[in-house]
Image: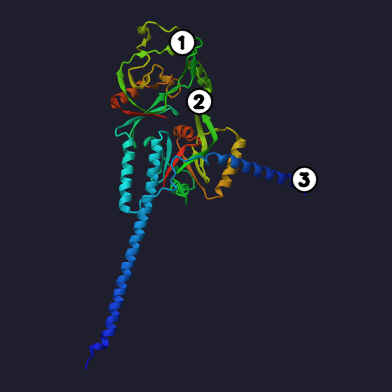
Amino acid sequence: MFDNRRFIPVVLLLIAAAMAGCGGKEDESAAGKDSGEAGELATLQDEYCVLKSELELAKSDSLYLVIDAPGERLVLKQRGTVLWDQPIEVQGDGDGPKVFAASFVGDSRRFVRKVEDVHLYAFSEQSPDSVLKIVSETVRTTIDRMQRIIPERFDISWQDDLILEVVTGIPGRPESKFSNILTAIHRIFQQQGHGAKLVIRMDASRSVTFYRIAARGLPTLVIPG
Amino acid sequence: MTEKKFRYAAGISLVAIVTAVTGMIFSAGCRDGRLPADTTSLQLPGDAQKAKKELKAMRSSLAKMVPAKPYIVVDTHSNRIYLRTADKIIIESKCSTGSGGEYIDQASGRRWIFETPHGSFRINSKTKSPWWRKPDWAFLEEGESIPKNEEERYDPEMMGDYALGFGNGYFIHGTIYERLLGINVTHGCVRVGSEDLKKIFDAVPEGTALFIF
């Protein structure tokens, strides 16, 4: 005679195993949901920091630079309004904008830093001094005030060894070879640390504005990728 | 140690010291300066819905600061003027901005600095065929006496065909010296070539936002 009772433990075991399996899936799903929400909150937290920073900068009425890594552009803003912008054209095989932005923000989550130093390696002059001399006498100013520098190469640095180098390809002359050597050595030491270096190419006429704006102390906001 | 080796070691040491000192000087600048926005301690509300609501409000606050219509930007660094939106340049042209020179009237001691003001402004007047009302410095610079008759102050040529006023006697206007566009030669106004000036004049209404940097 077939005894159904013999199968009861087996059936119970199968049911228990099935329930445990389902339970496992629920746990996984719950864990996935938690990590998804945490990831979403982390993204929102970044956006919050960027927006909060920009609102504060925009209220100050002074110029600020935005390094927009996902948009791959440099933007000069005042009161939240774009005054000047420039696509980031990476030169050579250095760090890309997203790597640079990630280093800029770093573990301490700093989205705003001030320009610490600007070094001009070589430059040419926009107008011949002889022409400006004539004009300057008429308008009662000095040649220095009227002259515009076209950089061949300059770099901007922020704390924690973050360097943005700009090259234009316009042949120029160095202002001080000694200073260039010292800066080059200093940059080599900086590159041994945890910083980042982004080298970009810029049209000469655009670089005139960027070089003059990128003064020490310029607030810089980074939008990470 | 031979003398050659000693010199070599001394040279390396010198470079290392100079580099270290230079590094300290370079990096001393802004480290202690207060950042305009300290993001290291910012914390978004833990609840995703509340967080999104707060972000929406912040985006809206920032968007309200940006002009809704095309605006004018004057770049005094490269002497260029733009009519633009946030992501598109509509008109770009050479211009001339303030020379930064100064004039002191020896007789009265009055002093003028010829700079274009920086900041955000609004176009508050639009004039076709403007006449320039010459200020006192315009006479004094030329060694002329300041006229008592108001009518003697007006010059119908100097400002070109159009003028856009932005306050305190400053204008974006035309010029009879187009060859000097691109150079800082003005007494503070923004000079633009006649063709581009007409385009800008026709495109912007009074109230247009103007940024000068």
Q: Answer above or below: position of A205 versus A29.
A: above
Given the image, on which type of amino acid does mark 3 rest?
Glu
**Badge count:** 3
Q: Nearer the viewer, mark 3 or mark 1?
A: 1
Residue beneath the point at 45% across and 20% down: B114
Residue closest to the eye, B75 or A202: B75
Q: Is residue B120 above or below residue A42?
A: above
Quarter-of-image position of residue A87: top left
**Helix, strand or loop for disc 1:** helix
Quick one: label 3 or label 1, which is nearer the N terminus? 3
Residue at the image point whose x is 39% and y is 50% from the top: B43
- Which numbered disc, 2 or 1, marks the residue closer to the eye? 1
Tell me the residue that label 1 is attached to.
B140
Quadrant (top left/top right/bottom left/bottom right) for the N terminus of chain A: bottom left
Residue A168 coordinates in the image, percent (x, y): 48, 36
Q: Which residue is mark 3?
A: B3
Q: Same subunit under labels 2 and 1?
A: no
* Residue A147, disc: 2
Q: Callout 3: helix, strand or loop?
A: helix
Which secondary structure, mark 2?
loop
| Amino acid type of the residue tagged 1 in the rendering | Leu
